[in-house]
Amino acid sequence: MTSPDGPLAAEAAHVPVHLTRFVGRERELEDLAGLVRSARLLTLTGAGGSGKTRLAEELAHRCGDSFDRVGWVDLAPIGDARLVAQLIATTLHVPSRAGTTPLQALVGSLCDARALIILDNCEHLVDASAEIVDALLRSCPRITILATSREALGVASETAWLVPPLASAEAIQLFVERARATLPSFTLTKANTDAVSEICRRLDCIPLAIELAAARVRVLSPEQIARRLDDAFRLLTSGSRTALPRHRTLRATMEWSYQLLTEREQVLMRRLSLFFGSFTLDAAEAVCTGDPLETEDILDGVSALVDKSIVAMEPGDGVARYRLLETVRQYGLERLKESGERPAQEDRYVGYYLGVIENAAPNLVGGSNAPTLIAELVAEQDNLRACSCWAIGRDDRAEVALRFVGAMYWFWYALGQFREARDLTDRALALQADCAPLFRGRALVSSALTALAQGEYPLACRHFEEAFPLLRQAGDVDTVGAALAKYGASQLLGGDVEAGVATLEEALEFTRGRPAHDIAVIFAKFWRAWAAYAQGDYDAASELLAPNTEVGRRFGLPTTLAHGLVTEARIELARGNVELACAKVMEGLEIELAINDAWGIGLAVDVVAHVAAERKHHEEAVRLLAGVAAHRERLAVALPGIAPAERVRLVTMLREVLGERYAQLEAEGRMLSTAQVVGIALSEAARHTTEHRVAAADPLAPSAGSDGPRLRVLALGPLQVFVDGELVESMAWGSARPRELLVYLLMHPEGRTKEQVGLAFWPDASAAQLRNSFHVTLHRLRKALGTPEWITLVHDRYRVDPAVLEEFDVMAFERDVADARRSLKRQEEGASAKLEHALARFRGDFLDGEPVGDWHLEHRDRLQRVFVDSLMELGARLVAEDRHAKAADVYRRVLARDELHEEALLALMKAHVATGERTQALRVYRRFADRMREELDAEPDDATTEFFEKLQAGAPV
Amino acid sequence: MQSLIPVAHPSETLAEVRAHDQVMRYRRAGAGRPIVVLRGADEPDALWPELDAELISRFRVVTPALPADCEDVAAWVGDFLEGLGLDRVAVLAAEPCCLSALELALLNAGQVERLVLVPAGAVGETALDGTLATTLAGSSVPLIVVRRGLPAAVALPLLRQFLEHEGLPAAVG
């Protein structure tokens, strides 16, 4: 997982990138660049759609180099003023100490930083943003804040800068660019220039208004657009000659654009505006279906809205994601409210995401597909946060709130968002809810797990103790089983080793009989091993850990394997086996990095620091210890500190050896980002490990699935696709294109990029249309197959997972034919039968009767040539074997495919002669010659004619 | 946050707005829905002394520093409001800004959500209220005229009632 939210991306609250090009604004950017360097707070103001965010992005890209750090925080996804500081801190990965507010933590982290912080979309939280910005500017003299907001923040030292409309020429350029995205053939001509400039003038050169209008060029000419806008705006000014006030123009354009949608599209747009951030088609189908929209309507509707610039597609690969521009979303929300549908839709929306997180929850920890699942959920983070906050903010949805926090812990863990976990869990638990014990119990477990990770052991114990009776009452044995070990861990780390051991024994007992890869078993063994380690019983600890690392390897469970290895490394270190410890921790650390497990990374680097010290690499040891301490603070987590005495010894030794250098190295270490700390750790660990490396070719390769291949595709002749032996009915495909995509991908087993597919499928489409068509088709294909993972994306290439492919006849045909022809050449026994068998796969032309693109012609011709050439070889072989009747059959098959295949004709005539059917030979020649004259206005070859004439004359041949 | 008390002479203003090639300065105080107060720099008694505290306790009070040489106050305030991003905002204008505020409400229909005018003079003991129709379809501006001559004990409750009437939408969110 390489999410931008992961702990390794400490500096990477990235400035967004876009699919569409940034147009114009050169003069403004120059002015603004000067202001960014001189002002403390620069706020870009202006109506929605004036291009504040895009301008800020461009500015951040250009000025970023003048700062040590650039952080981008989008406030649009949060609706709660209390979360502003929290969100900024989380996004910037700001260190925090226990007992500090997020704002204090921010100030602490940024007080000396030369940083540019961009706060995008502040308008709905002006007071809260102003308060935080004011505090930051007062306490952090070297930071600059760039905000975008419809409304200025009104903070002392603010420069509010009204984003002006585009210059006329820029506006026209923008119109043309966006029009081309919809209609690639659109150009500015003498005939339409006036209309386009009139549109831009009418729309006050407001970028979003122009985009909305330009999106209509596929259906309306620029003249028609200009006229209709004129009519629409005249209505709003009661027919007076007064121009529409500038700040009303966008609203009016949006209104106009909305009115041009079909009624169903309007309904869809309203409902889509509930999504915070981006959404997938699956989510849209689940949330937006309902009178008058059927599930099938959603896909086409979203496509139509993309075409009309109402919905934008996100850059990136994999499952397509869409979003409404904030301004459009706000408008849609208003219309949703007006329609009276909002409460019901909100419940659907929140219900959908509750389902998403609850379904994922049991598989987020320990399982082999956990990293994939988490990567998928990261994309949904804005929605998950919005939904959980929505529920937490309403007393009448307290149960929903508790269910959210109860299901979200391992997601928070994976992202290292312990601070947010604490805040939301506390607030949900504080709701006075008349709630099922199951949900309250699970929420308490989330709270306890957060407390455990943050080192608040007494709180963790209290909440576990409160949760267990509720969960037992509800019969949720699995949660109890997994939580018992964590309860033991909390007791253990809290200092009560005896109670901890007792609870962990109970956890082992409780899970006895369950399989070794059960997460409850893994937890119980892991923490019981820690307890043994704490008690100095290294053998027992190793023995307990061994099954975990083993199932970790066997079942491809990265977290289990990595935590096991790192803990084994600790034990080896305690035993004095430094190099073995190093080999183990290196392997563990690499896995932790691959899955971006922040907590585990901290655990591993800590061990490497000890290894470095043992190797007398004292400077590295100090840097690593300090770096890992800072990393922990950034995450607001505690690492198990079982052996404080050991640590004190280590630090004392390092201080003695390094003297005055110690403090300096420690300060250096604290300044390191997590990525830098990991870099040092890896090079330290790599120094000695080659010969000690634990042998494992591919430690994470899961054992082969028991299901076996399940997809069968027959494309030689009419196309047939079978999933688990069942024919996929044509209804399920929606259209022919998804089927075509499947075959296209199968024809390129090495994978194809989106662009390559686009070139083959939609050669005339614009880049935007291509992306949309591609993802729509891919979505339909995945739906039709029923298992989305079958189409994989690796390094920008899409392909059909070869593991699920039972048969693809084209591939089998080419392979078997080649094989048989080799046998034939070597005159092997049974070669002709083998070839005949292989040729039987050819039921007809490649994709016969399918409405497919030209890309298939090349393959169709090649496959037909292979078929015909092979038949000719087979025929020759049969003749050599004196099986003339059979050979005649074969040549007839050639002529059936290619009636002007003269070589086949001659061979067929000879075969007939060999079986004594001279008349038949004469007949086939005459038929052939007639066809030839008709088709080609030509005569057969001399050799053939000569043979025919001899036959006709009764001469020996 | 620390409140910035609006002053009659906002020359030492702290925040600025750049819009339409002008640099405009203003003060802000309080939190909540915004209200824009227009008053002349040289008219310290144009409003009741008790009004500042009353407004700050309920609203985000924005007081622009009108340039001394401003020829078209209505247009200037329109640009200022646009630069600050204040859309559909309550405006309270004291002499000599009353006429400009009226003009603003007509000119930038929809930008002014409701309007309080405080003309000078002690004549008359009543306040007038009504609505101002604009050319923007469906747009009219509730209006109240309260003479400066009215005692604060009478005027302030009237203003409070008028300003807190339903229909002042918070900034879009």
Image (tube, coloured by chain):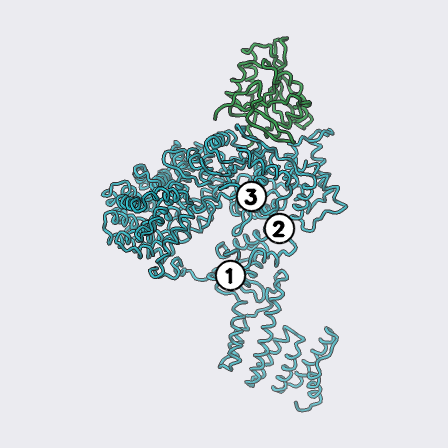
Chain colours: A cyan, B green
Q: Amino acid at mark 3?
A: His
Which marked residue is nearer to the observer: mark 3 or mark 2?
A: 3
The image's mark for residue A613 is none
Which residue position holds label 2? Answer: A769
Rounded to the nearest whole Å, what is the CA distance between mark 2 and mark 1?
30 Å
Which quadrant does the C terminus of chain A fall into?
bottom right
Q: Is residue A384 above or below residue A396?
A: below
- Residue most toward the front? A660
Res. A642 visible in picture = no
Upstream in sequence: badge 3 or badge 2: 3
Q: Amino acid at mark 2?
A: Gln
Which residue position holds label 3? Answer: A61
- Counting labels gives 3
Q: Amino acid at mark 1?
A: Phe
For the residue pair A331 and B36, the one nearer the viewer reads as B36
Upstream in sequence: badge 3 or badge 1: 3
In the image: residue A539, left or right of residue A433: left
Which residue position holds label 1? Answer: A722
Q: Numbered disc 3: what chain?
A: A
Q: Is residue A483 above or below residue A847?
A: above
Label 3 secondary element: helix
Q: Residue at x 64, y 41 (%)?
A: A26
Could you tell me residue A245's position as x and y percent? 67, 30
